[in-house]
Image: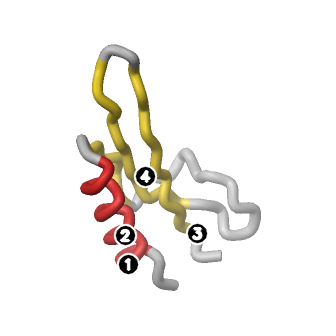
Amino acid sequence: RSGRALHASCKRDLDRPPTYSLEVVRLDPGTGAWLLDQPPLMPAQTYRTPDEWEARIAQARATFGKD
């Protein structure tokens, strides 16, 4: 309903340590579809550890989760 969503992901490669990503994107409030033609509210950022990634997810929820 807020028109915002967290897009959190983990990319695993056999030859490298995992990379954790987070961005806050805009959604169509009526359909929930990702508005790809709109810039993200928080551009994608990457993290090296799952602890830092999870802390940033919590921070983004606190910042962007409000209506």
Please tell me in which quadrant of the rendered image residue 29 appears. Answer: bottom right
**Quadrant of the drawing holding the N terminus:** bottom right
Is the residue marked by circle 3 packed among few (<14), some (14-19), or many (20+) residues within 10 Å?
A: some
The circle drawn on residue 39 is: 4
Q: Earlier in the sequence, mark 1 or mark 3?
A: 3
Mark 1 and mark 2 in contact? Answer it, CB < 8 Å. yes
Q: CA distance from mark 4 to mark 2?
A: 21 Å
Residue at which label 3 appears = 3
User: Which residue is drawn at the image coordinates 74% and 68% (left, top)?
Assistant: 30
Q: Amino acid type of disc 4? A: Pro
Circle 1 crowding by C-alpha within 10 Å: few under 14, some 14–19, many from 20: few
From the viewer's perspective, is residue 33 above or below residue 16? below
Q: Give the residue number, with chain letter if any, for mark 1.
A: 62
- Left or right of 3? Residue 58 is left
For disc 2, the neighbor class at 10 Å (few under 14, some 14 to 19, many from 20) is: few
Secondary structure found at label 1 = helix
- Of the numbered discs 4 and 1, the one sitting upstream in the chain is 4
Q: Nearer the viewer, residue 13 or 22?
A: 13
Q: Nearer the viewer, mark 4 or mark 1?
A: 1
Report how far apart the C-alphas of labels 1 and 3 lie in the structure: 15 Å
Is residue 29 or residue 16 the one in the foreground? 16
State the residue at coordinates (40%, 53%): 23
Amino acid type, label 1 = Ala
Q: CA distance from mark 4 to mark 1?
A: 20 Å
Say which residue label 2 marks: 58
**Residue farthest to the right, as pictured:** 31
Q: Amino acid at mark 2?
A: Ala
- Measure the C-alpha gap from mark 4 to mark 3: 13 Å
